[in-house]
Image (tube, rainbow, N blue to C red):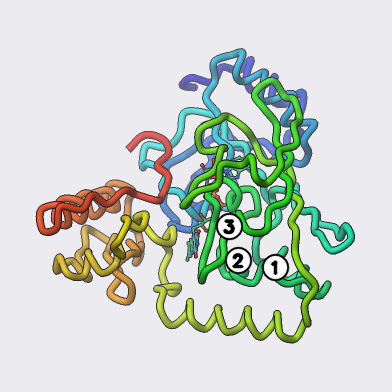
Amino acid sequence: MGKISSFTYEFIGVHVPKDNILLNEPMDKHTTFRIGGKARCFVKISNAGQLSKLVPGLKERGVPYFVLGNGSNLLVGDLGYEGVILQIGSGMNGMALENSNIRAQAGALLCQVAKYAQQKGLAGLEFASGIPGTIGGGIVMNAGAYGGEMKQVVAQVTVMDEKGQVITLEGDSMEFGYRTSIIKSRPLIVLEVLLRLRPGDPEKIQAKMEELAQQRKAKQPLEFASAGSTFKRPQGYFAGKLIMDAGLKGYSVGDARVSEKHCGFVVNTGRASAADVMEVIQKVQKKVKEDTGVSLEPEVILLGDF
Ligand SMILES: Cc1cc2nc3c(=O)[nH]c(=O)nc-3n(C[C@H](O)[C@H](O)[C@H](O)COP(=O)(O)OP(=O)(O)OC[C@H]3O[C@@H](n4cnc5c(N)ncnc54)[C@H](O)[C@@H]3O)c2cc1C
């Protein structure tokens, strides 16, 4: 049973309905890479009350846990994860209008919130409509595209700490930076977000979202499973160009491949393992470093045992 004892399962079962607790759950079902071994315990969270019991309880028992959104920036090792996955997804995805702001729960998908904003005639979130993550994951990563980033639209974030206490943080105290936020360095869980948008014409907002979707389709290998850009953009360079110039376009190990359409993406063309992806990542890092001296840092988050 690994690091999780039957007492821990019982403890989780006291706070979450049994149907929402999955044991030995394959993580390839929960990541856009379609890769990953089994998580010892996978819990579908429905409300903050559950988290306020589980998080301090797991911490007290020394059981590792990981907060999962839509798994779109994640590579889970082939040997899985010996801990508890707390999934904040469709069980916590409500949203509502507050004046010209939108309050959204962390599990709402960025595309759903962007669509909602469009229907309400609120502009500013168009950039996020094609990013396949949740609002919670988008805050953690300060997700961005086409000149927009979450930082620009976040007014307030409601988070929970490891004691189960709920805290409201103002947008400007979120320490947003390139693909990072305060939540990358502090054990906080995003519960909900208040987005500050501006009035706009729904037709124009829709047209902008469609234009960006077209650009994405033309440039990104959306036909294959991936976790988006594999590497962060090194200052002064583009990862994809460095990789192409290193002659690694199409480089593959098993079914993991440097996309021919966009070299910044490592894609899973079939049944790639996490080990295959890691081998491609390491080869890319080594060759680009040798050729240019630039270190490529993965943007993708690694979880579990490889
Ligand atoms: C095809 C494709 C295109 C992409 N394009 C872009 C793009 O244009 N721009 C961009 O920035 N990204 C892009 N991504 C990457 C990814 O979609 C974003 O990083 C997204 O914000 C991740 O959200 P998620 O819910 O999937 O998070 P996950 O992958 O589930 O988790 C990411 C991190 O956030 C943490 N986390 C998630 N939810 C919470 C929460 N509620 N509280 C605390 N921590 C949490 C996790 O623990 C993890 O550390 C793309 C990915 C794919 C597959």
Of callouts 1 and 3, which one flags the residue occurring earlier in the amino acid sequence? 1
Judged by depth in the image, the label closer to the viewer, 2 or 3, is 2
Q: In the rendering, at what x and y percent does residue 236 appear?
A: 30, 61
Cα distance in 3D space between marks 1 and 3: 12 Å
Whether pointer 1 and pointer 3 mark residues with C-beta atoms closer than 8 Å, the reply is no
Q: Is residue 6 above or below residue 230?
A: above
Residue placed most toward the observer, 59 or 289: 289
Q: Amino acid at mark 2?
A: Ala
Looking at the rendered image, the quarter that the C terminus falls into is top left
In percent of the image, x 36 and y 42: which residue is there? 78
Question: Is the residue marked by circle 2 packed among few (<14), some (14-19), or many (20+) residues within 10 Å?
Answer: many
In percent of the image, x 32 and y 51: which residue is there? 273
- Mark 3 falls on what kind of element? loop
Residue placed most toward the observer, 131 or 126: 126
In percent of the image, x 57 and y 84: which residue is there? 211
In percent of the image, x 61 and y 42: which residue is there? 174
Of callouts 2 and 3, which one flags the residue occurring earlier in the amino acid sequence? 2
**Relative horizontal placement of residue 198, taking residue 80 as reference (left or right):** right
Residue placed most toward the observer, 169 or 56: 169
Task: Give me the disc on residue 128.
Answer: 2
Q: Is residue 294 above or below residue 126?
A: above
Q: In the rendering, at what x and y percent does residue 35 appear?
A: 41, 52
Q: Residue 229 sits in which quadrant?
A: bottom left
Q: Amino acid at mark 1?
A: Ala
Task: Give me the disc on residue 114.
Answer: 1
Question: Is the residue marked by circle 1 packed among few (<14), some (14-19), or many (20+) residues within 10 Å?
Answer: many
Q: Is residue 15 above or below residue 213?
A: above
Q: In the rendering, at what x and y percent does residue 72 appear?
A: 51, 55
Task: Give me the disc on residue 133.
Answer: 3
Q: Residue 25 sits in which quadrant?
A: top right
**Beta carbon at label 2 within 8 Å of ligand 1:** no
Q: Amino acid at mark 3?
A: Gly
